[in-house]
Every structure is written in structure tokens, then in C-alpha cells.
């Protein structure tokens, strides 16, 4: 079986699972197994989605505005987390002494859920977009930071000797040797970081009442507008799927030199 044929079979299997899930949803809601106040029909969800995105030309378009706000917040937090995580990770990963001293502290702080820091962030920044952005960046930074540390720590010792022989400065070694070597780990960390930034953005919008899909979903749940709640949830899934697919494509392009 060729690689292309195997990939096609994987797509077919994934499509079959999705079709089965949608069929179960359609049957459960239309047959009345679950109250429609809690589980709307797929048709009602799609209608709310089309109206919220103003696809029919007669909708409000509020869901589109909320989606743009969430995506913008997610991307800003992710970019900030990636820059800080790569910079700190390179500084820590290139030094065995720094790793020995800081690794226990990093492992202690890393498991802290970013959402648990929202009250602290509110007391520092107040209820404003900068507060949510800071929490998103903090939560999304750790996958990139730890992946960068691991990537730099895994540099082949002989490359360190080559760098000394060539009298490369610390900065030159990081840029020319360490960063390309750590790139697979960094990109994997950035993909995970994107997911974290989306999750924390939604939670922050719910708690801090900031415009976005999190706020839209929370208001729909409180008003028992199940179709709008599910429409927002479907949008979140689509945003997560699209962002991960784009990063996977970028990773494949950037690491093309590693492929046999």
C-alpha cells in the first residue's frame, strides 16, 4: 500500500466516523431522545450558524464579529507566547547550568492552569482586553518554552565542539546551529500552544465578559438558546481544526529538508 493510498484510506475512515456522529446527533434530536432545549437538531444549528455569520444576507452577523474577536485574541496571545517562549527557551536550553537551576522551577509553574490566574490578572490589569491577552500568552507560552529547551538541550555534543572550533559566539551558535536543530521541537510546541491559546481565550472571554465566542456561548447557554450555543461550539471546532491544519502545513514546508 502506497503512502498516498494510506492517506486516502485515513481520510475515508475519518469521514465515516464524522458521518456516524452526525447521524447519531440527527437521530437523537429529531426522535426526541433528548430535549431540544438542550440538544438542538443539526438543521437548527446550521440555521443559527448561517444567520450568525450572515451567510444568507438577512442575519445579524454577530457571530462573525465574535469569531473575529476570538481569532484575533488567540493569534495575538499565540504570537506573543511564541516569541517569549522561543527566546527564553533558547537562553535556558543552551546552558546546562541554567537548565539544572531552572528546570525544577519551570516544572513547578508549568502545571498551573492559566484560568486559575485570571483573578490575579484582573486585580493587576482590571477587566480589559490586555488582561485576557496576558493570561492567554502566559498559558500558551509553556508548550513553546519547554519544547525549545528540549530542542536546544538535544543538540549533538559534537556540534558544540564544532562551534568552539569555529569560534562561533553564543548568539551565532544559537542562530546557525541550535535553532535549526531545535526547530522540530519548537514547531510541535507552537502547534500545541495554538490550541492552548484558543482554549484560554474562550475561558477568558467567559469570565472577563470580553467580546468573543466565549461570551456568545455563555450568553446563549444562560438564555437556553441551544442552537446558538451549538453554532458557537461548531465554530470553535472549525477554528481549531483550521489553525492546526495551517500550522501542520507550515511545519511540513519548514521541515522539508528533513524528509527523506
Image (cartoon, grey):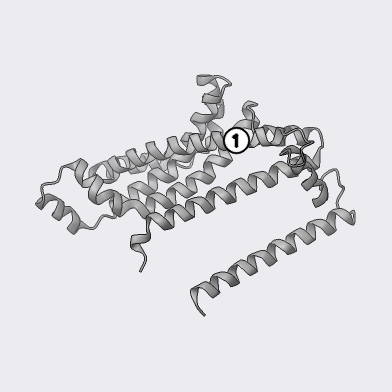
* Secondary structure of the residue carrying numbered label 1: helix
Instruction: Quadrant for residue 59, please give it.
Output: top right
Residue 33 in sight: no
Identify which residue, 138 or 168, lies in the foreground.
Answer: 168
Disc 1: which residue: 70
**In the image: residue 217, left or right of residue 188:** right
Residue name at image x 85 percent, y 51 percent? 34
Residue 232, visible in the rendered structure: yes
Q: Residue at x 49, y 29 (%)?
A: 134
Image position of 184 (left or right of 77)? left
Whole-percent x, y for residue 17 in the image? 69, 65
Q: Position of residue 178 (x, y in %)?
A: 26, 50
x 23%, y 49%: residue = 176
Q: Is residue 150 above or below residue 257?
A: above
| Residue furthest front in the image | 57
- How dense is the environment of label 1, judged by Cα within 10 Å: few (below 14), some, or many (20 and up)? many
Amino acid at each position: 500500500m502506497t503512502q498516498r493510498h494510506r492517506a486516502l484510506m485515513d481520510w475515508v475512515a475519518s469521514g465515516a466516523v464524522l458521518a456516524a456522529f452526525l447521524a447519531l446527533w440527527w437521530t437523537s434530536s429529531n426522535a426526541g431522545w433528548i430535549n431540544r432545549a438542550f440538544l438542538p437538531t443539526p438543521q437548527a444549528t446550521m440555521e443559527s450558524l448561517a444567520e450568525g455569520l450572515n451567510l444568507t444576507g438577512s442575519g445579524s452577523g454577530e457571530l462573525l464579529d465574535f469569531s473575529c474577536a476570538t481569532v484575533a485574541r488567540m493569534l495575538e496571545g499565540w504570537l506573543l507566547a511564541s516569541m517569549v517562549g522561543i527566546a527564553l527557551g533558547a537562553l535556558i536550553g543552551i546552558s546546562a547550568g541554567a537548565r539544572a537551576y531552572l528546570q525544577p522551577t519551570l516544572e513547578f509553574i508549568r502545571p498551573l492552569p492559566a484560568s486559575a490566574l485570571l483573578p490575579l490578572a484582573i486585580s493587576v490589569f482590571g477587566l480589559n482586553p490586555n488582561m485576557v491577552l496576558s493570561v492567554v500568552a502566559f498559558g500558551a507560552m509553556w508548550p513553546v518554552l519547554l519544547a525549545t529547551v528540549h530542542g536546544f538541550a538535544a543538540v549533538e555534543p559534537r556540534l558544540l565542539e564544532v562551534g568552539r572550533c569555529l569560534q562561533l559566539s553564543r548568539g551565532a551558535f544559537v542562530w546557525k546551529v541550535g535553532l535549526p536543530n531545535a526547530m522540530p521541537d519548537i514547531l510541535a510546541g507552537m502547534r500545541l500552544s495554538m490550541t492552548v491559546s484558543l482554549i484560554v481565550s474562550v475561558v477568558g472571554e467567559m469570565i472577563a465578559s470580553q467580546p468573543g465566542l466565549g461570551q456568545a456561548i455563555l450568553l446563549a447557554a444562560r438564555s437556553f438558546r441551544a442552537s446558538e450555543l451549538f453554532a458557537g461550539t461548531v465554530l470553535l471546532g472549525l477554528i481549531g481544526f483550521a489553525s492546526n491544519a495551517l500550522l501542520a502545513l507550515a511545519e511540513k514546508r519548514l521541515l522539508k529538508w528533513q524528509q527523506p
